[in-house]
Image (spheres, coloured by chain):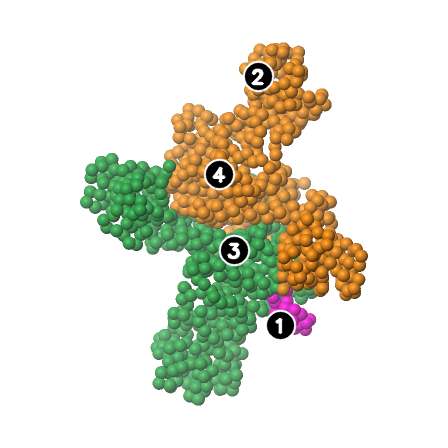
Chain colours: A green, B orange
């Protein structure tokens, strides 16, 4: 038996017990003929004492030790004279009687402490050592707990967790599919699923009624900082439901998760905001509503104002930053630099300081008079001491720049507290979005998303105006999940394909088996998928999903620890009847 | 709102309530001016009554209906005059007031009943309809429940469910790896994991202490009747454990599953049997111990007997089939045919009838006398009325044929009751097996399996005799899971690689990053993996794993429903910089 207790469980109540512990050497100190060792495992740290003065055998063993050595000790639980209030085990120590070195360790390439000296690449290469660090392991423990509680909740709600295939079919639309050559069916390929979308809809056709799965999905795309080629979804689908039914179930799930992991009670219904309202007031379909600072549209106010920038711009809008009228020239320049960053892309920034003495100071003083500023201040609800920040330009670009500016100001003003959570359903997304490049409509969500009944007539007259039964759950400005009520009517589905520019043949090729299934009594259904990695990182209070994945890949899709992907043997390619083309030097 | 209740929940207690139901039309009957409809959903069947005589509108709707149509009805709960005791809802019916056709259905290609007229291929092609059938859906519900309870149990035991990557590295040994070309890293490939073995060992090095995962694994091999290219494992690993610790935890898990899904209590410790004993007594490392009928080895008894077949055979052994002495010539011929089948491969079958009158009748009467038969009977523990069946030949082949014969006789004698469960730990597997073809040892489990301490010395003198800390859980002759205590000592691991014929370089290439991890304080550890598909099929009392998988593939690795694998666009291959070689016509 390697241990009678873990390193996290002994207390004063265990005094004088003979115990066996195993774990890693976290720290060693020699003091007055005694050696003190902090022994660590997943559950905690326990202090060991070796009386090396009177026990020569122990002293010999102790001399061999270094950080991260694995040892087993037997000894007696004693009360510490010098208690450590920070450790749950801080009242006791183990007077070691027997000692066994289970495995030595080379010097780790970085310190295994909460704050480490290891850089990103190094920690990824030695991920198994990085995972030993408390904050990293705690993220994964939280991930386990969240997954477990998702299952608890959905099981109680009669959902059946059903595994769908990982080896599926590549579709012509699946440009970002990973494909897998088949040995038994040479010349043919499987694809890895970007989501189990089709299968969960088939399960509804199959009458499963309530399906969920916590499942790996795959996308072979150029990775932005916070994407992974394999990621995890909480994938759900329900039959015989309308939008509100789904929102209620998953609002319930979200509340359950907050309750059990953070003891946060939401004693209110999550607010619902239309896509249109979100764009108008926050310039984003995932607004952070921990703070207000809504956009004020100024186009009407600045008509014929003589300031060409405002006059020429299709959109002029601003925000009011409370109490920031005292910003210095330098601070304002910094803000201007911020909005001019290429990824934000504004041309410049107009400010209006509403000074505490009631006067105004603005970068556009020469175009506007005090009366106009007063009128603006009223429109913004600004008080003396506030700062109005205004952007002008092409509508969607400017809104999105203003959104970034709002978030930046929220950050500066301390309005984005990581311990505050502001959930929001964004609803009524447009069904379609126009794609300039291909000169046709794309489905904003996917081709199976249903239009709102009251907008059906617009499908023929003004498709861009049609709203979908689609919804996103947004928390603190982060999109946690989204979904839609699906089309279950054959005729409507065909109309949708037409609108999206599919020929009958293309629709048949790509979605034939689902369309076929719909002929045999498909129930009304809809669903939602949550980004599990994103959800965990939100709950963990960290920004990157990489920190909540045990073995993540880097920005080039590489696992630097195992060095993958990698070349394979020629014979393996032979068996698959494929070969590499000429190198593209 | 599509429904106020499901089709499985209304009872007499709901009398006179106005309810809304949605579901599928299971059956329609017209009787005396009334139309009776069985409305089905996942939860049950409720009888609807349409008074088509007095409600012309309903009669019109009812005329449109066919099997599997999806409808919504509103009506009042009434007591049935003609109650159906077989249905939980059989005391009530719904007198329909409003009626809505939600979706029509074409005539399904087979009947959606517990017993269907659809053949295998057809049901696979229309799997979404097959899944509507009760027995199929119940298998998947059981699968959900088993998965859920595995998690409940392991969570309570402090295991952390941790996802390991699906896109990993192909190793030269991974001949059966599926590989995945990388677009971002052209010329390089990921592999899909045959198991998360390496990652779970790394998690132990990382100090995760107790890991599990219910996880998809992949193997690109020629599929036998009951294999799937993607399958699911309950994968587990523990640190600071010896074999017995692991057996206890997972015996506990197995008992928990039997308790919660079948209300079966095992009030005993699962028996443990050495591999050697299992082979000797049952000719199999996964004996079905629901019944005895142990092998009796006869080589000593038939030395110099004059019967050449016995004299020449390295192995002679038999079983005693209780009460079968009355077998007719024809029945015995059938048994002979059975053992001669190519997949069983015996040359012939010798029988000895121990007649109820105490006399003997045997196919080898002319070689042996009554006294010898009496002596055999004693060795077999045979009583008058029993039948002794004997095979002779090369040892392992004959043992395995005798094993099949034993199972066949167990089946005939009704000794293999699907409702009886006989769990067994098979332990002390050999560490190595000699491979004639490559003229070297292979690891019986995998190269990281540890030898028994007491056999360490044999590694140098007689490697074939070394037993491993490896174990399988067998229930009713089915291997449900298996695992081992791993090597955590560098030196021993290198010795192991040597024994397996690896050069240092090969070992480094294939397992370098794991070996490297072992240098930084690897704890003693071990684990187990359960075949989840197999486990579910055992609990469901069915033979094939295909019946417990929502969307299985056929024997050629094809999903006939979605028609996968399939050719992909040339452009997709271009992006990956690969192409097909010449067709191998």
CA gap, disc 1 and disc 4: 61 Å
Asked whether residue A189 is in view, the answer is no
- Of all chains, the one bearing label 4 is B
CA gap, disc 4 and disc 2: 37 Å
Residue identifier under label 4: B251
Task: Say which quarter of the image contains residue B21.
Answer: bottom right
Crowding near pointer 1: few (<14 within 10 Å), some, many (20+)? some
Single out the mark in the foreground, 1 or 4: 4
- Of all chains, the one bearing label 2 is B
Q: Circle 4 — which element? A: helix
Residue B464, percent from left and from top = 47, 26
Crowding near pointer 2: few (<14 within 10 Å), some, many (20+)? few
Residue identifier under label 2: B378
Task: Say which quarter of the image contains residue A219.
Answer: bottom right
**Disc on the earlier residue, 1 or 3:** 3
Crowding near pointer 4: few (<14 within 10 Å), some, many (20+)? some
Chain part drawn in magenta: A448-469
Q: Is residue B61 left or right of residue A456?
A: right
Q: Do the numbered discs 2 and 3 sit on residues whose CB atoms are within 8 Å?
A: no
- Of all chains, the one bearing label 3 is A
**Disc on the earlier residue, 4 or 2:** 4
Task: Say which quarter of the image contains residue B242.
Answer: top left
- Residue at left 45%, top 42%? B237
The circle drawn on residue A465 is: 1
The circle drawn on residue B438 is: none
Residue A459 in the magenta stretch? The answer is: yes
Residue identifier under label 3: A153
Q: Do the numbered discs 4 and 2 sit on residues whose CB atoms are within 8 Å?
A: no
């Amino acid at each position: 038996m390697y241990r009678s207790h873990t390193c996290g469980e002994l207390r004063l109540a265990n005094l004088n017990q003979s115990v066996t512990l195993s774990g890693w050497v976290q720290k060693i100190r020699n003091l007055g003929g005694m050696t003190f060792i902090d022994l660590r495992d997943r559950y905690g740290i326990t202090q060991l004492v070796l009386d090396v003065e009177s026990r020569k055998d122990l002293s010999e063993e102790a001399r061999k030790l270094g950080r991260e050595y694995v040892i087993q000790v037997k000894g007696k639980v004693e009360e510490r004279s010098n208690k450590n209030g920070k450790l749950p085990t801080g009242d006791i120590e183990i007077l070691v009687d027997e000692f066994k070195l289970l495995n030595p360790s080379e010097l780790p390439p970085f310190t295994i402490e909460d704050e480490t000296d290891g850089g990103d690449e190094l920690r990824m290469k030695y991920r198994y050592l990085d995972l030993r660090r408390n904050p990293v392991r705690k993220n994964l423990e939280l991930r386990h707990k969240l997954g477990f509680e998702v299952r608890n909740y959905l099981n109680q709600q009669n959902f059946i967790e059903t595994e769908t295939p990982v080896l599926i079919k590549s579709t012509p639309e699946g440009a970002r599919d990973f494909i897998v050559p088949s040995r038994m069916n040479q010349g043919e390929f499987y694809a890895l699923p970007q989501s189990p979308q089709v299968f969960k809809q088939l399960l509804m056709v199959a009458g499963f009624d309530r399906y969920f799965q916590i499942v790996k999905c795959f996308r072979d795309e150029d990775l932005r900082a916070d994407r992974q080629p394999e990621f995890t979804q909480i994938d759900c689908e329900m039959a015989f439901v309308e939008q509100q039914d789904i929102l209620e179930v998953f609002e319930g799930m979200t509340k359950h998760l907050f309750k059990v992991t953070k003891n946060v009670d939401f004693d209110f219904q999550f607010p619902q905001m239309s896509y249109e309202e979100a764009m108008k007031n926050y310039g984003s379909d995932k607004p952070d509503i921990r703070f207000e600072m809504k956009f004020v549209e100024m186009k009407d106010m600045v008509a014929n104002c003589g300031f060409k920038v405002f006059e020429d711009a299709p959109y002029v809008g601003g925000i009011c930053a409370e109490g920031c009228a005292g910003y210095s020239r330098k601070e304002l320049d910094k803000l201007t630099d911020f909005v001019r960053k290429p990824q934000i892309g504004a041309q410049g920034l107009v400010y209006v300081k509403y000074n505490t003495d009631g006067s105004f100071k603005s970068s556009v003083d020469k175009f506007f008079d005090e009366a106009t500023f007063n009128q603006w201040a009223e429109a913004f609800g600004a008080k003396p001491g506030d700062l109005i920040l205004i952007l002008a330009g092409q509508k969607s670009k400017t809104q999105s720049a203003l959104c970034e500016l709002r978030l930046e100001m929220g950050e500066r003003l301390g309005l984005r507290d990581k311990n505050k959570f502001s959930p929001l359903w964004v609803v009524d997304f447009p069904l379609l979005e126009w794609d300039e490049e291909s000169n046709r409509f794309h489905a904003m969500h996917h081709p199976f998303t249903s239009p709102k009944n009251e907008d059906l007539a617009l499908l023929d007259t003004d498709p861009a105006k049609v709203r979908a039964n689609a919804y996103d759950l947004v928390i603190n400005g982060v999109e946690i999940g989204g979904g839609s009520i699906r089309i279950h009517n054959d005729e409507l589905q065909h109309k949708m394909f037409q609108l999206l520019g599919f020929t009958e043949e293309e629709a048949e090729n790509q979605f034939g088996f689902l369309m076929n299934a719909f002929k045999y009594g498909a129930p009304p259904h809809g669903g939602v998928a949550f980004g599990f990695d994103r959800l965990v990182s939100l709950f963990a209070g960290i920004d990157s999903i990489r920190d909540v994945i045990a073995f993540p890949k880097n920005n080039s899709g590489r696992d630097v620890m195992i060095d993958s992907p990698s070349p394979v043997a020629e014979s393996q390619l032979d068996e698959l009847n494929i070969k590499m083309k000429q190198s593209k030097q």
